[in-house]
Image (tube, rainbow, N blue to C red):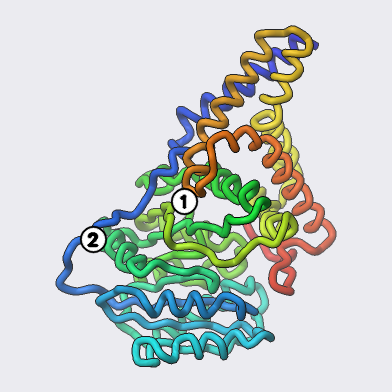
């Protein structure tokens, strides 16, 4: 048994040394848009497309923040009211009535969900179709969620990044709602795990196979979207943002980063809301593969659970070497988590709780597989997409 524990300790430590040194600098959380903006003689036309289904509680905030952008170029909003039952379209119209002359917002009534599409991609498809009719000369589409409050200079920063560096897709991982105790415990880890899964510096690097985007805020060059087959090219994808990033990166350049000021205003009401968010697509992320699920569970145990367990076992049994390796792996874990915690205003010492958070996320992933096997996979906003070929 001591030799087995020693091997586990060595493997866990090697995993963390690899993650800290060789895994694309994911943990530094340093991919940000420039705060200073260059002067431009002209700014390209942008049409923002907002898919919305039962978003009455937040849609007004999103509309006002977009129409209040300090953007010198032409800007129009298209909100696709995806058969909402809570007055989403009416509230959106009221929010936009007094901004930009009341003429910069178009409400599109969503059509019945077409076969083979996920709800969001179908709404985006309708929105992009309408955007092309409203402004045939628009150079960019801003694909955003209905719960995002955009800082006033956000669009200028996104467009400047795309124009200066010839990016075909510029995406922001917005600040998620993180105020109550449960959110502070779970949400920074969600962002940390996303960066670990898709290291942002690697995603932003030409020639790298990594491609990531965050669906809450994506500025897409129109010609690049057309080359990628439009929204139709990702119609059945449940993880639509990263699927779009892969297709666009195949022929162009993409960039994803973090922001402190553009944020989601949707709260997570307890563990259940976060659980549903993760379980909706976690098994899809694993290719709906049982062997990958088993591998993921083992990997999470070796990476996150093993270090504190090894410290305790080593101290109790007097196995100093095992305790030391477990402690070093745990410390590296805490150090790599610290920049994301700092982004969310949390103390670095909270990183010592990451193993417990990882256990919860592992259980969410297992439940995601269970829901898929029960025919409830991909449930979202009253719809179930277990039959789609999401990757």
Q: From this viewpoint, which residue is outermost toward the right? A: 374
Q: Is residue 106 visible?
A: yes
Q: How many marks?
A: 2
Question: Quick one: label 2, few (<14), some, or many (20+) residues within 10 Å?
Answer: few
Q: Nearer the viewer, residue 266 or 376?
A: 266
Q: Position of residue 303 (x, y in %)?
A: 64, 30
Q: Nearer the viewer, residue 198 or 191?
A: 191
Identify the image quadrant of the N terminus: top right
Q: Nearer the viewer, residue 233 or 125?
A: 125
Q: Are the residues flagged by discs 1 and 2 in contact, CB closer than 8 Å?
A: no
The residue indicated by pointer 1 is 211
Q: Position of residue 257 (x, y in %)?
A: 41, 52
Q: Position of residue 52 (x, y in %)?
A: 58, 78
Position of 106 relative to 140 (above/below): below
Q: Nearer the viewer, residue 171 or 310?
A: 310
Question: Quick one: label 1, few (<14), some, or many (20+) residues within 10 Å?
Answer: many
Which mark lies nearer to you, 1 or 2?
2
Identify the image quadrant of the C terminus: bottom right
| Lateral position of residue 11 relative to residue 137, left or right | right
Q: Secondary structure at mark 2?
A: loop
Residue drawn where x is 60% and y is 51% of the image: 187
| Lateral position of residue 210 relative to residue 307, left or right | left
Q: Earlier in the sequence, mark 1 or mark 2?
A: 2
Residue drawn where x is 60% and y is 38% of the image: 350
| Lateral position of residue 37 relative to residue 133, left or right | left
| Lateral position of residue 144 relative to residue 270, left or right | left
The residue indicated by pointer 2 is 37
Distance between mark 1 and mark 2 Cα atoms: 26 Å
Q: Is residue 287 visible?
A: no
Residue drawn where x is 29% and y is 74% of the image: 71
Residue drawn where x is 63% and y is 23% of the image: 12
Position of 12 relative to 315 (above/below): below
């Amino acid at each position: 048994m001591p030799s087995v524990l020693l091997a586990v300790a060595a493997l866990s430590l090697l995993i963390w040394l690899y993650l800290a040194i060789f895994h694309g600098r994911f943990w530094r959380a340093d991919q940000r848009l420039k705060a200073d903006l260059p002067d431009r003689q002209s700014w390209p036309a942008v049409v923002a497309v907002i898919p919305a289904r039962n978003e009455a509680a937040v849609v007004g905030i999103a509309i006002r923040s977009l129409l209040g952008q300090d953007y010198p170029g032409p800007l129009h909003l298209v909100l696709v009211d995806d058969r909402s039952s809570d007055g989403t379209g009416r509230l959106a119209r009221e929010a936009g009535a007094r901004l930009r002359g009341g003429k910069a917002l178009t409400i599109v009534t969503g059509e019945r969900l077409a076969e083979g599409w996920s709800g969001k991609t179908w709404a985006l498809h309708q929105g992009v179709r309408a955007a092309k009719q409203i402004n045939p000369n628009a150079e960019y589409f801003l694909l955003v969620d209905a719960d995002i409050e955009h800082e006033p200079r956000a669009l200028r920063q996104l467009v400047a990044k795309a124009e200066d560096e010839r990016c075909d897709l510029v995406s922001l991982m917005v600040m998620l709602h993180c105020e109550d105790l449960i959110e502070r415990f779970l949400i920074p880890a969600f962002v940390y795990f996303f960066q670990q899964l898709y290291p942002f510096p690697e995603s932003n690097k030409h020639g790298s196979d990594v491609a990531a985007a965050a669906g809450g805020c994506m500025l897409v060059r129109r010609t690049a979207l057309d080359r990628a087959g439009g929204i139709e090219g990702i119609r059945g994808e449940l993880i639509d943002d990263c699927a779009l990033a892969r297709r666009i990166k195949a022929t162009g350049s993409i960039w994803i980063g973090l922001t402190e000021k553009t944020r989601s205003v949707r709260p997570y009401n307890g563990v259940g809301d976060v659980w549903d968010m993760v379980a909706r697509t976690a098994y899809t992320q694993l290719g709906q593969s049982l062997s990958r699920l088993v591998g993921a569970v083992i990997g999470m145990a070796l990476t996150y659970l093993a270090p504190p367990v090894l410290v305790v076992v080593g101290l109790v049994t007097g196995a100093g070497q095992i305790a030391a390796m477990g402690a070093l792996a745990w410390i590296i874990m805490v150090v790599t988590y610290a920049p994301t915690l700092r982004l969310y205003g949390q103390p670095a010492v909270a990183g010592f709780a990451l193993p417990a958070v990882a256990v919860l996320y592992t259980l969410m992933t297992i439940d995601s597989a269970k829901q898929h096997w029960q025919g409830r996979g991909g449930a979202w906003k009253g719809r179930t997409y277990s039959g789609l070929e999401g990757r």
